[in-house]
Image: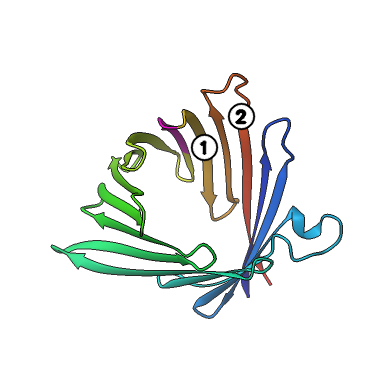
Amino acid sequence: MKASLKGRYELQKSNSPAAAAATIAFNAGDVKLRASLTDATVVNGPSLNGLALAVEKPGFFILDYNVPKKDFRFQFMNSVRVLEKPLNLTYIHSRGDNRTLLDGTLVLDSANKLSANHTLGSGNCKLKYTYVHGGVNTFEPSYDLAKNSWDFAVSRRVYDDDVLRASYQTSSNVLGLEWVRNSKHQGAFKISASVNLAEENKVPKLIAESTWNLEI
């Protein structure tokens, strides 16, 4: 049986505690079974705090269950064609806060995509354009209608497995940097750092994630 183990460590500001989390996923036929826990699950003895379970059929649906909150989250995916172009649709509903999110991505060609997401019952709507130049550089400007602000991201593929990405959120003045590796032989990891440029003490928030593929 194939499985994967993902670990996450988050180091925040000096006055905030560090946080850790782990996720293990199993393939069961054409679906995936996933369990996630945080440091709250094991600190001060085993508990249900931070424990979440999920069932996923890639490309079709994801069902998440937050164990301590007894809260379900449904996600359904589908794809249709509009003017001979694929339109990927995602419907997400969280039962606990009764929130529904609609997301759509229109793939114009291999280099250009248009995306939009909207939370029902609110004025929150985000638009994003993605352009891939030469299969190496990616540019992603996005516009938040609710905040009337722009976000920008640019990434570059380095070698075959590594991607470097920089982003800037104009509404919050947050600058982010990421290094992502996805290798079949060496596994996958992501290291990211973000800093709020509006703060007097510009202490970065650091996150490290790593994924290992296992044979059980």
The quarter of the displayed image where residue 205 is located: top right
CA–CA distance in space, label 2 to label 1:
13 Å
Residue at point 20%, 67% (across, down):
81
Residue 167 in magenta stretch: yes
Residue at point 37%, 34% (across, down):
152
Residue at point 75%, 53% (across, down):
39
| Dot 2: element | loop
Q: Residue 137 carries which label?
A: none
The residue carrying pointer 1 sits among few (fewer than 14), some (14 to 19) or many (20 or more) residues within 10 Å by Cα, namely some
Q: Main secondary structure of the magenta part?
A: strand
In the rendered structure, which amino acid carries the disc numbered 1?
Glu
User: Which residue lies most toward the top here?
Assistant: 200
Picture coordinates of residue 148, whole percent (x, y): 32, 36
Measured along the vertical axis of the image, is residue 196 above or below residue 53?
above
Question: Does residue 177 appear left or right of residue 4 in this picture?
Answer: left
Q: Nearer the viewer, mark 2 or mark 1?
A: 2
Q: Between disc 2 and disc 1, whose residue precedes?
A: 1
Residue 43 in magenta stretch: no
User: Which residue lies most toward the bottom here?
Assistant: 29
Residue under circle 1?
Answer: 178
Picture coordinates of residue 210, whole percent (x, y): 63, 50
What is the span of residues highlighted in magenta in the rendered image?
164-171
Quadrant of image for the C terminus: bottom right
User: Which residue lies most toward the right here?
Assistant: 45
Question: Does residue 41 appear left or right of residue 208 in this picture?
Answer: right
Residue at point 67%, 69% (across, down):
67
Residue under circle 2?
Answer: 204
User: Which residue lies most toward the front here?
Assistant: 121
In the rendered structure, which amino acid carries the disc numbered 2?
Pro
> Circles 2 and 1: CB distance less than 8 Å?
no
